[in-house]
Amino acid sequence: MEEKVLKNTSIHYWINDVKVDNAIVFIHPAFGDHSCFDTQLDYFKNYRIITLDLIGHGKSIGKGKLEDTALYIKQIMEAENINKINLVGISIGAVLVQDFANKYPEMVSSLTCIGGYDINNFTQELQKDTGNGQKKMMFKALFSIKAFAEDNKKISAYTEEAQEKFYQMNLRFRKSSFRYLASLGKMINKYQTKERSYPLLIGVGNHDNEMAKKASMIWYESEPQSEYVEFEGAGHIVNMDTPEQFNKVLKKVIR
């Protein structure tokens, strides 16, 4: 994977040198970075792969807004001569890839959202539950990133291996980067869901919290043409907990 910086931005991204039409962009969860998808790189090596560090995460430190992630993805595609993309998002990544699909549906080959919720139909009840959990974690992080990372790894991952890797990523997250996350609300209930011309996969780990599982099921029931998968032996970051199962399921969806 070659590391690049998107022109006129602070966004760092990585891309392989496979020259095919089938392209995938992987968007990581909050407090992580592009290395969340290391267990996908070899399996999908025959596809054009893009990973990136969201603004405020990893190497993408500087000017920018999280709500502009869809635009950054579009600009990466233009820079790399990619016309359509398979979108894969985990947690906050699932929010961001939906925002791209809302804005540029003609550029979407498939949409995979893990541990997310329908941003076009985000009820007040789900917003309250999600917001309360986020506030508690952010409050803890303000006092100690280490304590925050210790708690967050257990909430996010189920296996010890995934917990340790995610813990190390969380330790590198800067307190100052919490300001970037505040803009997530600007993407909520902004668009009406239209008939999709591409496959939609909604997934959740069977060890994820009940709110996440409830939100995923509500979304699936509202879009009967979608596919729903509950991954056994996984928490919130399914692709890190059960990479083999995740990779096999994802391969059936991407185009």
Image (cartoon, grey):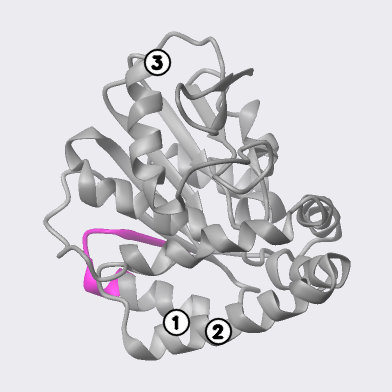
Binning the other alpha carbons within 10 Å of mark 1 as few (below 14), some (14 to 19) or many (20 upward) gives some
Instruction: Look at discs 3 and 1 and give the one toward the viewer.
Output: 3
Secondary element under disc 3, as helix, strand or loop, is loop
Name which quarter of the figure residue 30 lies in: bottom right
Secondary element under disc 2, as helix, strand or loop, is helix
Asked if residue 150 is among those painted magenta in the image, a careful observer would answer no
Q: Distance between the residues labelled 1 and 2?
A: 6 Å
User: Of the residues under marks 3 and 1, which one precedes in the sequence?
Assistant: 3
Q: Residue most toward the front?
A: 63
Dot 1 and dot 2 residues touching (CB under 8 Å): yes
Q: Which residue is drawn at 22% across and 59% down?
A: 225
Label 1: which residue? 214
Quarter placement of the C terminus: top left
Q: What residue type is labelled 2?
A: Glu
Label 2: which residue? 210
Binning the other alpha carbons within 10 Å of mark 3 as few (below 14), some (14 to 19) or many (20 upward) gives few
Binning the other alpha carbons within 10 Å of mark 2 as few (below 14), some (14 to 19) or many (20 upward) gives few
Residue 76: mark:
none
- Measured along the vertical axis of the image, is residue 135 above or below residue 236? below
Q: Which residues make up the magenta segment?
A: 220-229
Q: Distance between the residues labelled 3 and 1?
A: 38 Å
| The one of 8 and 195 positioned closer to us in this rendering | 8
Label 3: which residue? 80
Quarter placement of the N terminus: top right
Question: Residue 207: where, in percent of width, then height?
Answer: 65, 74
Name which quarter of the figure residue 140 lies in: bottom right
Question: Residue 99: where, in percent of width, then height?
Answer: 31, 53
Q: Residue at x 54, y 10 (%)?
A: 17
Q: How far apart are marks 2 and 3 (CA)?
A: 40 Å
Question: Residue 21: where, in percent of width, then height?
Answer: 34, 16
